[in-house]
Image (spheres, rainbow, N blue to C red):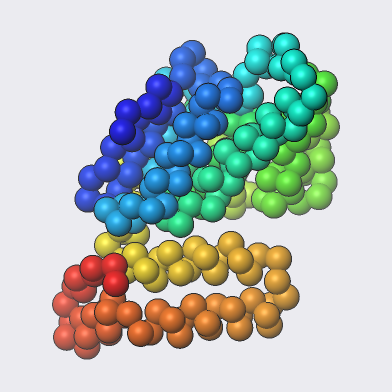
Amino acid sequence: MSYKHFQVEVSDFIATVTFNRPPVNAQNRETREEAIRIFDQLSDRDDVRVVILTAAGKTFSAGADVKERVGLVQEPGDYISHNRVAREFFYAVADCTKPVIAAVNGPAIGAGFALMLACDIMLATDTAYGSMPEVDVGLSGGQSFVMEHFSKSKARYLYFTGARVTSQELYRLGIIEKVVPAEELMPAAMEIARTIAAKSPLAVQGAKRGFSTTAEMPVRDGYRYEQSITVALSHTEDAKEAQRAFVEKRKPVFKGR
C-alpha cells in the first residue's frame, strides 16, 4: 500500500518504515492515523519479523505540528479525539507485535522524542539529540516515556528546562545502543534487524510480549507469566526445529509455526 507521509519497504522479513513529511517530519493527525494503520498491518504480516523506523531528511521528527493546534477545537470532543489519536500513534509502535528498531537520523523533539522512546531498540547518528520542549509552547505531555528511561532528577530536568540531550549522552546513560556517523546508521540498524529476523519469529514475538506485559508486574508474577509463554512456545514447530538444529550443529530454518 502507498501512503502520503511514510514509505514502507519489506525485504527478507525486515520492514523499513521511513517518516517523510518535509521539512522536519512534524506530526499531525494525518501522519498519526497513517502510522497507526502501518504498524497494525505490520503486526499482522507473516512476511515481517522486525521493523526499522527511520525518517527522511536531517530530522527524525520535530514533534507535534504546532500549527495544527490553531483552530483545533471546533466543537466539544475535538480535543479528546485529538488526544486519543496521538496516544494510539505511540502505542501502535510500542505495541507492535514485532520488535521496532529506531534509526534516529537527527533531532527527536517533543513528540518525536517520545516516538523514539516508544521503540524497542534505539540507535542514532552522532549529530542527533533528544529534547522535550513541551512547556516552551505552553503544553505538557510525554512525561511517561521520559520517566521510563531516565532517573527522577534527569527526567524532570530535561522536561522543565527543555534541555537537549545528545546522542552521546543517551549512549552513556545506556538508553540507546549505538552512536554512529550518518552514513553508518542504516547499515547498523540493518545488522541488528537481520540478526533478529534470523531467529524464530514466534519466540521473538513471545519475548516482546513478555517484556511489555511484565513491565508493571512484581518479579514473581512476571516470571510466572514468562514461563507460560515458554510452555506455549515449546509446542511449536519452530521450537522443535531450533532444538534439532542446535544438536545437529546447523542453522535452523524457521517457518513461524
In the figure, 184 relative to 138: above or below? below
Residues 195 and 31: in front is 31
Residues 70 and 162: in front is 70
List the single residue furthest toward the bottom. Answer: 247
Q: Residue at x 34, y 59 (%)?
A: 196
Say which quadrant the C terminus sits in: bottom left
Residue 178 in the image, given as x and y percentages of width and height = 46, 46
> For residue 224, what is the image quadrant?
bottom right
Q: Residue at x 63, y 69 (%)?
A: 214
In the figure, 176 relative to 82: above or below? below
Residue 84 in the image, given as x and y percentages of width and height = 67, 37
> For residue 167, what is the image quadrant?
top right
Residue 100 in the image, given as x and y percentages of width and height = 45, 49
Residue 183 seen in this snapshot:
no
In the figure, 3 relative to 176: above or below? above
List the single residue furthest toward the front. Answer: 75
